[in-house]
Amino acid sequence: MHLPPDSLFEQSQRGSEIHTGIHLGRGWHLDSPDGDMPDAAPTAPAWPLWSRSPRATLHVSAAHFPVPVPLQLSLQACAASPAHPVTLRIVSSGHPPLTRQITGPTTLRLATPRHADGTAGSAITFELSAFASPLLLGHGTDPRQLGLGLTGLAPRWPLRARLRSRLRALFPARHG
């Protein structure tokens, strides 16, 4: 089932932190391939994380990432293959949109969002041209509709900037 991005039934997963200062937004599966839902939303979901529609978001904290830093993402698209590339479009606040063709596992570097003054954080939005079910494709037993697979995420910033950012998050009054 596909839910429109602004559906009342589409719940944000903001409680699920996948890296310090980076949380799941809308559009991600939290259930396991067999359909079991965890008793409570996990604090650190298991990798890979799969989107459940062609559009999904990550929320980046302005306290942890006050300035843009390089972010390395390891991705794959369920419906992608060398014979059938899938188009991925990434929108991050303060940066031009990034568009790539995906045919298999891919590593991308992009900058974390440039936050507007006074905001708590900004979103990175991922949009795919196609999504599919591994079961229907004959690639496994997972019956869920899967779009983008996030298999890894790592900020790549200098140690000094990382320490300053962490201090700002811990002591906002001193480092404003």
Image (cartoon, grey):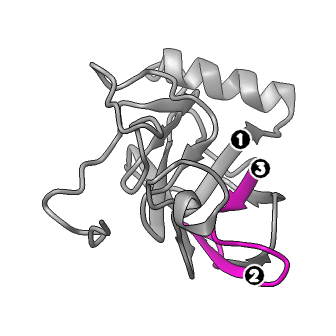
Q: Reply above or below: 11 against 96.
A: above
Say what amino acid the circle numbered 3 marks: Ser
- Please state if 87 lies on the left or on the right of 7 as rendered: right
Q: Kindly identify the residue that appears in the image at 81 percent across and 65 percent down.
A: 104
Residues marked 1 and 2 touching at CB (< 8 Å): no
Marked residue nearer the N-terminal end (1 or 3):
3
Q: Reply above or below: 122 against 38.
A: below
Residues marked 1 and 3 touching at CB (< 8 Å): yes
Q: CA distance from mark 3 to mark 2?
A: 17 Å
SS at circle 3: strand
Q: Is residue 113 visible?
A: no
Q: CA distance from mark 1 to mark 3?
A: 6 Å
Residue that carries the numbered disc 1 in the rendered image: 153
Measured from the top left, where is residue 70 in percent x and y? 78, 50
Give me the disc on residue 65: none
Q: Kindly identify the residue that appears in the image at 64 percent across and 48 percent down.
A: 150
Q: The magenta stretch spans which residues?
A: 73-97
For discs 1 and 3, the disc positioned in front in the rendered view = 3
For discs 3 and 2, the disc positioned in front in the rendered view = 2
Q: Reply above or below: 66 against 57.
A: above
- Please state if 68 lies on the left or on the right of 12 as rendered: right
Residue that carries the numbered disc 3 in the rendered image: 74
Number of other residues with Cα within 10 Å of mark 2, as a class: few under 14, some 14 to 19, many 20 or more: some
Residue that carries the numbered disc 2 in the rendered image: 85
